[in-house]
Image (cartoon, rainbow, N blue to C red):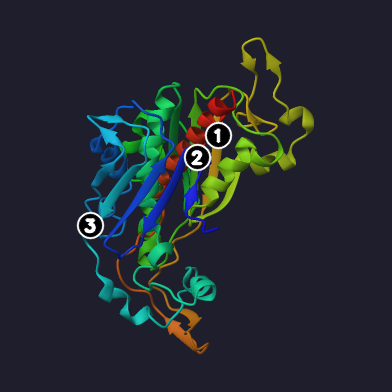
Amino acid sequence: MPGNTFGQVFKVTTWGESHGVALGAVIDGCPPRLALSAADINAELARRRPGVQAHASPRREPDQAEILSGVFEGLTTGTPISLIIYNRDVRSRDYDALKDVFRPGHGDFTYQAKYGIRDHRGGGRASARETVARVAAGAVAQKVLDREGIRVLACTVELGGVPARFKDETVIWDNAFFCADPEAVAPMTARVQEVTALKDSLGGVVEVRVRGCPPGLGEPVFDRLDAALAQAVMSVGAVKGVEIGAGFAAARMLGSEHNDPLIPGGFASNQAGGILAGISNGDEIIVRAAVKPISSIGREQQTIDVSGQPRTLTVTGRHDISAIPRIVPVLLAMVRLTLADFLLRQRTNA
């Protein structure tokens, strides 16, 4: 079954390619009578829009979503919601030299191996451009979460080896790296400038926090909430690792250190990251994602062409130096989609 649909009750199918006419999403299972407008969606899209940050791709897309169905007089109707975002600033000629060459770190080789055909213009369906549809759908999912008082926050906690702390959530969207630690912005900027001069790229870590999630979300064994969150976050192309709560640090702890004592007011600590036995426990859910460096770099790399012959490649065109910060609203959206689906699944099973 083609893997373009996410969710079981709140289902989202994304479509479109980097240099196609448009991208979009079809959302099925959204409850009726939720206030929804294009402005709600576009406010979220503005955070991942290219051509905004100084170190981001200069591709300038307005990223204005249009709602084609499923909304009447400002309210969802319970029928499928169809969203479309047109591509306005494509320069496909930048990719002509890549038609018969596989770029290291990209999906060129694997898409060719799977389908026997690939769209070389900007990576086609494998491009990070696809995530614009996820962010649009995530804005709709938040409307479902709003009814339950569930908030989802996301921010950069590391960029290129420069760490940050979760200090002040009110400043996340006010700086170039979507970071909750204002003191980390200057060293992050210096690191970006250093790597830009080397014609290289950077990775980092993004943290997503969920507040107000009720206990009881999640299914036993195979449909655990933490497993679903990991799959959702890992489905974003640049993500190479996911941890919940203490995550990999748990491997170096004693049981007495990792266990969260229960007290009358809840839990005394949160090493579990808000999830026990795959089910939410009512505490803050904490998810972290390891984001790889952008694969398109200006340095010479070794590769092969479609005939298997060795080639030397320098990638040109318009590219980010890091998936951070534009991946932050994408991961925010994936957590929203997961929670909306599990919340509605819980209501269905009740």
Question: What kind of element bears circle 3?
Answer: loop
In the image, farthest residue toward the right: 255
Does residue 175 appear left or right of residue 113 in this picture? Answer: left
Q: Earlier in the sequence, mark 1 or mark 3?
A: 3
Q: Which residue is mark 1?
A: 286
Instruction: Give the CA separation, mark 1 to mark 2.
Output: 7 Å
Q: Earlier in the sequence, mark 2 or mark 3?
A: 3
**Nearest to the observer: residue 310 or residue 217:** 217
Q: Residue 283, position in %: x, y?
A: 58, 23
Q: Residue 310, position in %: x, y?
A: 50, 88
Residue 342 higher or lower than 84, as above or below: above
Does residue 176 appear left or right of residue 152 in this picture? Answer: left
**Dividing the picture into quarters, in which one does residue 30 lie?**
top left
Q: Which residue is mark 3?
A: 60
Residue at the location (42% across, 29% down)?
144
Tell how many labels.
Answer: 3
Q: Residues within 10 Å of mark 1 (few under 14, many from 20)?
A: many
At label 2, which amino acid type do we have? Glu
User: Which part of the image, by quadrant, shows the C terminus?
Assistant: top right
At label 1, which amino acid type do we have? Ile
Residue 178 higher or lower than 235, as above or below: above
CB contact under 8 Å: marks 1 and 3: no
Question: What kind of element bears circle 1?
Answer: strand
User: Which part of the image, by quadrant, shows the N terminus?
Assistant: bottom right
Q: Residue 17, position in %: x, y?
A: 35, 62
Q: Earlier in the sequence, mark 1 or mark 2?
A: 2
**Nearest to the observer: residue 83 or residue 51:** 83
Residue 292 visible from this viewpoint: yes
CB contact under 8 Å: marks 2 and 3: no
